[in-house]
Image (cartoon, rainbow, N blue to C red):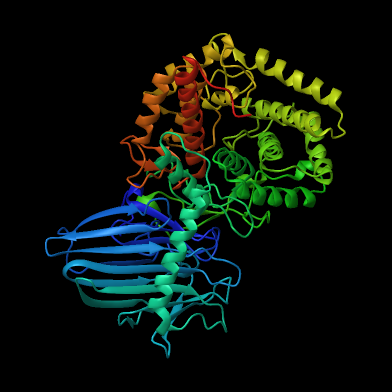
């Protein structure tokens, strides 16, 4: 599959440890192996020539085959249909949920429904982001063993098992061609096999594939059935929930911000970041979305992860805005100069240098998550509360500092609205937890500081010229981050200054249902050139504000219009490009959780209007 393939032509599969992207042409073009933040073995998404891929497709049918992709309902199992004049076939792709003691595996099952079709397979892995050589060996059981050479993980290898004959090529790939008739099937599995681990036996391949398929369907359907959400747009809400679940680590409880790295915010541009890490901010909002849908196990897992991070802090100032999924803090940023990038967008970056930025807002998002968990998921302990108090006291003492802001600008620190707003949230939620649980706390001090922050935002982040709250103190730039002011309950939707801000945002940043985060030519600079698309999560924030303000008909219309910008599989990247295409890392957790939040609020407000007459509903918290 070419690196020019649109992102919306890819489906996501995963095993709650890592993910893969499969194109609608049947090519697996992206797979970090065996963890979200591991080096890739397939990365044709970022370089069709060098990145590596695993393709299964009808032979000699270019231009003559029509393809469609769909998920089996309420699952993470992906189906690709090949429709030709002479036949019909289905390719089923999934990753069995990996439990302790099991190996990471990708299962691909091919079935011909009509006619007789010849297929070609090529498995062309490229280890360590296509930086390391590898070798392939045929094993006694007929499988092919691929082993990376000169990689950081000298023990990494995987087997390719096939029910059809394959052969190794001199350049280290695996190829095969065969014909299947109606009713016939073929199975293929790649399985991580650490050195000295025999894996499963090749003669059990068909049995394994059938069992893994049944187990995977069962897992996803039971998980979705455990949701308490029964409202409108349930199919899209559950697809977003499944996507968030696919981005959540079963082992650690953390959630990565997106599945990919290096995908551009503007095609040909240089804003190409690695999002395969756990942002405290993004993960906190994700747990909020899970809780709204009745998924409490995920919030418990994330809280354990957070408790471990807090326990490791020698000082509250040491809390990073992002970590690896296992909680390690090393995210050194590197550029992969040998990869051409998605549609020639360079550089391709791994790691993320923003991890070392000072960002005050993360304390607010973290406290909001703890507050919600304490209220809806389970009580927190006093020992953990003492650690929380350290964080709240730090916010109380440092809220007046400048920082890099929620958008992680890299040029200079400023007094951003996002920081002050979320510092207010940190203190507000801490006060509520202390009062609810009768925990000891310096409530008088916290109340005083919370009030000071409110006054600061109300008076000093307001621009008379713009008639709006602005991006940073003393500035004149509108920022969609202001859309969070009512959503975090700092200001009422009825507050006149907020209503004026909403009108200003609609005038400058909104294009029908799509919303820019801010205009780069006037706002805080990230030091890079080029433009970006509209941020879909901001569109959902805007819609949720309309709903809370009681403008339900407009909110519903715009919500359903934004749903139309999803990929055919219901997936969203970070942004929508000038031609309505997905751009940025894909799929992105923040976009999907914002969809869930908007759907939840709008559905409840519509129900309230039907039962009690016109008007908005109550906030979740």
Which residue is pictured at 44% across the width and 69% down the height? 212
**Image coords of residue 346 (percent x, y):** 43, 50
**Image coords of residue 268 (percent x, y):** 38, 45
Q: Is residue 281 above or below residue 173?
A: above
Marker count (numbered): 0
Residue 372 occupies quadrant: top right
Tell which residue pokes out farthest to the bottom in this image: 140
**Image coords of residue 373 (percent x, y):** 68, 40
Which residue is pictured at 51% across the width and 66% down the height? 33
Which residue is pictured at 35% across the width and 47% down the height? 569
Q: Is residue 610 above or below residue 358?
A: above
- Horizontal side, residue 582 vs residue 413: left or right: left
- Horizontal side, residue 386 vs residue 513: left or right: right
Residue nearest the viewer, comparing 552 with 29: 552
Residue nearest the viewer, comparing 45 with 618: 618
Tell which residue pokes out farthest to the front in this image: 611
**Could you tell me which quadrant the C terminus lies in?**
top right
């Amino acid at each position: 599959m070419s690196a020019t393939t649109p992102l919306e032509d890819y489906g996501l599969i995963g095993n709650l440890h890592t993910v893969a992207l499969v194109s609608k042409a049947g090519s697996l073009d992206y797979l970090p192996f065996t963890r979200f933040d591991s080096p890739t073995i397939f990365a044709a998404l970022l370089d069709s020539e060098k990145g590596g891929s695993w393709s299964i497709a009808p032979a000699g049918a270019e231009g003559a085959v029509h393809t469609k992709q769909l998920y089996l309902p309420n699952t993470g199992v992906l189906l690709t249909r090949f429709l030709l004049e002479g036949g019909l076939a289905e390719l089923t792709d999934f990753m069995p949920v990996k439990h302790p003691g099991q190996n990471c595996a990708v299962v691909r099952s091919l079935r011909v429904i009509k006619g007789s079709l010849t297929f070609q397979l090529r498995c062309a892995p490229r280890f360590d982001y296509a930086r390391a050589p590898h070798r392939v060996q045929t094993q006694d059981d007929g499988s092919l063993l691929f082993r990376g050479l000169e990689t950081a993980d000298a023990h990494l290898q995987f087997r390719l098992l096939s029910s059809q004959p394959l052969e190794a090529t001199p350049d280290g790939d695996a190829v095969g061609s065969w014909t299947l008739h109606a009713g016939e099937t073929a199975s293929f599995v790649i399985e991580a096999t650490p050195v000295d681990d025999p894996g499963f036996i090749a003669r059990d391949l068909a049995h394994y594939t059938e069992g893994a398929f049944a187990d995977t369907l069962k897992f996803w359907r039971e998980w979705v059935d455990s949701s308490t959400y029964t409202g409108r747009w349930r199919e899209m809400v559950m697809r977003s929930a499944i996507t968030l679940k696919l981005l959540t680590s079963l082992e650690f409880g953390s959630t990565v911000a997106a599945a990919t790295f290096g995908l551009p915010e503007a095609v040909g541009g240089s804003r190409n970041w690695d999002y395969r890490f756990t942002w405290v901010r993004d993960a906190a909002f994700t747990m909020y979305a899970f809780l709204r849908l009745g998924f409490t196990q995920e919030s418990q897992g994330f809280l354990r992860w957070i408790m471990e991070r807090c326990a490791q802090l020698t000082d509250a100032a040491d809390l990073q805005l992002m970590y690896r999924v296992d909680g390690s803090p090393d995210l050194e940023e590197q550029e992969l100069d040998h990869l051409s990038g998605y549609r020639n967008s360079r550089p391709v970056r791994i790691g993320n240098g923003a991890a070392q930025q000072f960002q005050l807002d993360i304390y607010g998002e973290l406290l909001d998550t703890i507050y919600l968990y304490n209220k809806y998921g389970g009580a927190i302990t006093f020992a953990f509360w003492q650690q929380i108090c350290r964080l709240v006291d730090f916010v109380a003492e440092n809220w007046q500092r400048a920082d890099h802001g929620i958008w992680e600008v890299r040029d200079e620190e400023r007094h951003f609205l996002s920081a002050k707003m979320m510092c207010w949230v940190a203190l507000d939620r801490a006060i509520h937890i202390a009062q609810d649980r009768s925990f000891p706390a310096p409530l008088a001090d916290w109340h005083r500081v919370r009030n000071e922050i409110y006054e600061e935002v109300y008076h000093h982040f307001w621009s008379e010229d713009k008639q709006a709250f602005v991006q940073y103190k003393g500035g004149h730039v509108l920022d969609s981050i202001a859309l969070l002011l009512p959503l975090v309950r700092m200001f009422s939707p009825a507050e006149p200054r907020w209503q004026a801000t909403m009108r200003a945002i609609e005038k400058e940043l909104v294009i029908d249902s799509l919303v820019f985060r801010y205009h780069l030519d006037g706002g805080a600079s990230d030091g890079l050139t080029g433009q970006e698309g509209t941020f879909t999560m901001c569109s959902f924030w805007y819609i949720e504000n309309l709903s809370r303000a009681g403008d339900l008909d407009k909110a519903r219309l715009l919500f359903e219009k934004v749903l139309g910008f999803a990929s055919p599989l219901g997936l969203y990247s970070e942004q929508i490009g000038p031609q309505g295409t997905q751009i940025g890392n894909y799929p992105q957790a923040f976009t999907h959780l914002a969809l869930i939040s908007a759907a939840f609020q709008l559905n409840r407000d519509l129900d309230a209007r039907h039962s009690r007459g016109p008007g908005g509903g109550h906030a979740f918290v």
